[in-house]
Image (cartoon, rainbow, N blue to C red):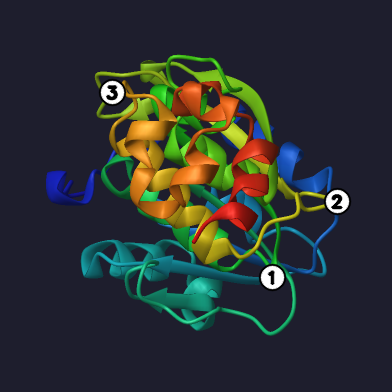
Amino acid sequence: MILRKSLGQHFLKDERVCKRIVAALQEHPFTQLLEVGPGGGALTRFLLKLPNVHFKAVELDPEKVDYLISTFPLIRDHLIQASFLEIERPFPGNFTVVGNFPYNISSQILFRIIDWKDSVECMVGMFQKEMAQRVAAPEGSKVYGVTSVLTQAFFTVEYLFEVPESAFQPPPKVRSAVIRLLPRRQLVPMRSGKDLFLLVKTAFNQRRKTLRNAVKGLFAPAVLQEQQFDKRAEQLAVSEFAELTFRMK
């Protein structure tokens, strides 16, 4: 099989890892499932066997599409040849997402899932370890940032397990980790998702500065005098960012 470095392709080959991902999926029942980037089909072969599940897979690379159809004929009518970042919602109603995500677009994939937060009932995904840690990081952590806050505002993040380089062909230069996202049972109150995105991205754009200096264009001078603006962005909990959206201009 031909590898395309531009697509960030490292193919999962360890069946034990595939089975652990499927087991993590099945802990939360679903009837509609989208696999992102099936690649060589290591995970797909197990997903196609799941009973009573409407399955689809989205794959950009035409050579992988041909390979998947020839190897798994059942997938022919369930395969979308496109970029996950460009497709419409794949199902009416709620659906679950799974994938060994390409490292080079993993943050974009997360933001797409956040865009679809009203429909995504669960996501189990493999990311570069550093990315997975960032998504799951609590406030105060050195890796807590935009991705942490924006994901955790809408989803509960579970850091499930790590995957060694040897589980892939070719082996990547970094370890991987699998995380699960589940919709928060109760969303933190915020003025709007758009306001939260603007505030969080502005705050972390100058993360070494105090909030007062980093976000001064978003608040009235009187509000900026409050004590919490003495903190840096990484010191604020998700709920604090959400609360601040009500104070924005």
Q: Is residue 204 above or below residue 85?
A: above
In front here: 6 or 38? 6
**How many angstroms separate mark 2 from mark 1 (CA)?**
14 Å
Tag 3's secondary structure?
loop
**Residue at point 51%, 33% (across, down):** 225
Q: For the point 34% across and 36% down, which residue is it?
A: 214
Binning the other alpha carbons within 10 Å of mark 3 as few (below 14), some (14 to 19) or many (20 upward) gives some
**x, y (%) of residue 196?**
53, 54
Pick the front one: 173 or 239: 239
Residue 149 relative to residue 122: left or right: left
> What is the three-letter code of the residue carrying label 3?
Pro
Residue 190 image position (x, y, % from top left): 68, 57
Residue 101 in view (yes/no): no
Q: Which one is closest to the eye, mark 2 or mark 3?
A: 2
For residue 131, say whether it is visible. yes
Label 1 secondary element: loop
Residue at which label 2 appears: 185
Which is more foreground, mark 3 or mark 1? 1
Q: Which mark is residue 203?
A: none
Task: Find the distance from the CA under tag 3 to the CA under tag 1.
Answer: 34 Å
Q: Nearer the viewer, residue 37 or 44?
A: 37
Point 86% across, 51% down: residue: 185
Label placed on residue 119: 1
Q: Position of residue 98 (x, y in %)?
A: 58, 52
Q: Quadrant of residue 62?
A: bottom left
Task: Read off the residue under disc 3.
Answer: 171
Q: Earlier in the sequence, mark 3 or mark 1?
A: 1
**Which image quarter: residue 221?**
top left
**Compared to 82, does 167 lie above or below?**
above
User: What secondary structure is found at the residue carrying circle 2?
Assistant: loop
